Image (spheres, helix red, strand yellow):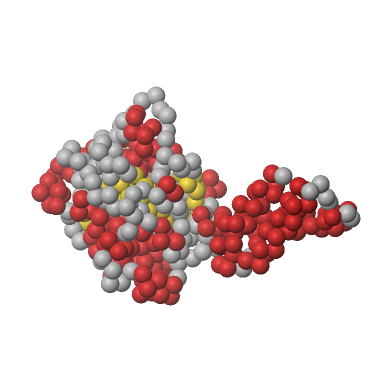
Amino acid sequence: MAVLTDMDIAANQGLALGERFGATSRAQHAQSVFAQCERNDVNGQDRLFERRDHKLHLASYLIKCKMTFIESMRRLTMGHGNWSARDWEAYAARSVHGRSRSELFGARGMDAAYDPMRIGIRESRDSADNPDSTPIIIGVDVTGSMGMLAEELVVRGLNETFTMLMDRRPVSDPHVMAMAIGDAYCDRAPLQVTQFEADLRIVEQLRQLWLEGGGGGNEGESYCLAHVFAGLKTEHDAMEKRRRKGFLFTVGDEPVLDGVERDQLARVLGIDAQRGVSGREAVKLASAGYEVFHIIVDGSYAARNMRKVRASWEAILPERVIHLKDPARLAETIVATIEFASGRHARATSGLASLLPEPLRRLPWAGLGRI
């Protein structure tokens, strides 16, 4: 009866999703049929299967039902759909505009769905909606006052990023993953990770992350967790099918803690390693599948210690560190960097190129990605 158990699970979950994908009536019918099958099986009867052709027809129908739900659940987790300005405006008017940070982010602990230790692999896969997908990871510091970065992404950053990417098209079919980054030495949730998404679901998932607001007095944050996760726990069709890298941006105002210790790999990421990894090793892992950058924003720490912050980053990510004075221009900075890394100049009239440091404006980009 294993197939019945699988279908029961699929039907129960599918009922909640059916309206979105037009499968509600099929879900209810399938659930009813399976319930009857189970009753007959328990009673030692086989009324539904008296005729062989009826049995084959029913089996075929139930397989189709099951596949409908598998595809529905797959669509919810693997970057289907497209960004819509109309959908964003309606959602923002209903759920974003006029709300405080505490109203936008209501979590009081880490949701297991975003716990990297529980995640096997996060995937960015091609689909009918996005046949030429490009993964883009945006990992923001959420310690202390840096919770404003996640707020910036929800209020306008993600909408602006998708809108500019669609308008300027430096890459095709963007799939965005959001990460919340903290301190592996003292935080309960030093890394949280959404799915790769192509529509409003990325905003919904971002709002479910916990803004722990922790961090310690150790003059740094565990940004390298994002690099290791990207390198060891993500897969994407852009690389596997087209040998094309995605993009990874970490954003924050503190120095980078150099690498990830062995116990942190196990406790935070669920990775059993013989030793820890250095900062340069973490970046190298991520660079196998992503063009990696860090954006320093003017927070309270960086404003006082910019030289120290930049030096820590240049040591592991030379010539890929961007200083952003105005966090409201985060989306512009990300798009400008993607344009340059894709071999396209940011348009002079937009002013985007001026956001990038001189090393990032040098062409050609043939050496990009080498550590």
- Spot occupied by residue 311 in the image (x, y as percentages of width and height): 18, 41
- Spot occupied by residue 287 in the image (x, y as percentages of width and height): 39, 41
Would residue 207 be visible to someone looking at this image? yes
Q: Nearer the viewer, residue 30 or 74?
A: 30
Q: Is residue 172 above or below residue 181?
A: below
- Spot occupied by residue 364 in the image (x, y as percentages of width and height): 35, 50
Question: From this viewpoint, which residue is outermost toward the top?
Answer: 274
Question: From this viewpoint, which residue is outermost toward the left?
Answer: 304
Q: Nearer the viewer, residue 156 or 28?
A: 28
Question: From this viewpoint, which residue is outermost toward the right?
Answer: 51
1 on left or right of 246 = right
Residue drawn 66% across the image and 48% down it: 5
Residue drawn 36% across the image and 59% down it: 207
- Spot occupied by residue 228 in the image (x, y as percentages of width and height): 38, 39
Question: From this viewpoint, which residue is outermost toward the front?
Answer: 43
User: In what quadrant of the picture does the N terminus appear?
Assistant: top right
Residue drawn 20% across the image and 41% down it: 216
> How many labels sit on residues?
0
Residue drawn 15% across the image and 42% down it: 308
Q: Is residue 146 above or below residue 99?
A: above
Q: Nearer the viewer, residue 279 or 141?
A: 141
Q: Nearer the viewer, residue 200 or 19?
A: 19
Would residue 249 be visible to someone looking at this image? no
156 on left or right of 173 = left
